Amino acid sequence: MAHSIYVRKIGDGCESSWRTLAHAIQTRSEAVMLARRLASSYPESGADPFKRVFWFRDRTGLHEIRASPES
């Protein structure tokens, strides 16, 4: 089953919709690894195991990034 990576901006009292960042990734492990690496490419980043997402902060604010099966 193919997987996608989704990202959204959070914080400041708002949550944007999930946007597709990448798709047609062959396995879940590859998709999770890519999402983790993308998040960790920012100096301020981490993981939220309860929500199963990674997060990062850039100059525009706080973001969540996740890997999920394509629907």
Image: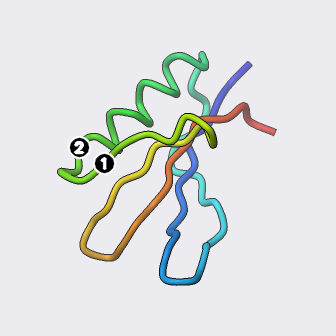
State which quarter of the image contains the N terminus.
Answer: top right
Q: Is residue 50 above or below residue 57?
A: above
> Residue sitting at 54 percent across and 62 percent down?
8
- Secondary structure at numbered mark 2: loop
Above or below 31: residue 22 = below
The picture places residue 4, in percent across and down from the top left corner, at: 61, 37
> Image check: 35 left or right of 4?
left
At 23% from the left and 50% from the top, the residue drawn is 42
Say the numbered circle drawn on residue 45.
1
Amino acid type at circle 2 is: Ser
Residue 37 in percent (x, y) is at: 32, 33
The single residue placed furthest to the left in the displayed view is: 43
Q: How far apart are the two marked residues, 1 and 2, measured between alpha carbons?
A: 8 Å
* Foreground pick, 63 / 25: 63
- Counting from the top left corner in percent of width and height, residue 62 is at 40, 66
Q: Determine which of the numbered discs, if any, sits on residue 41 in the image.
A: 2
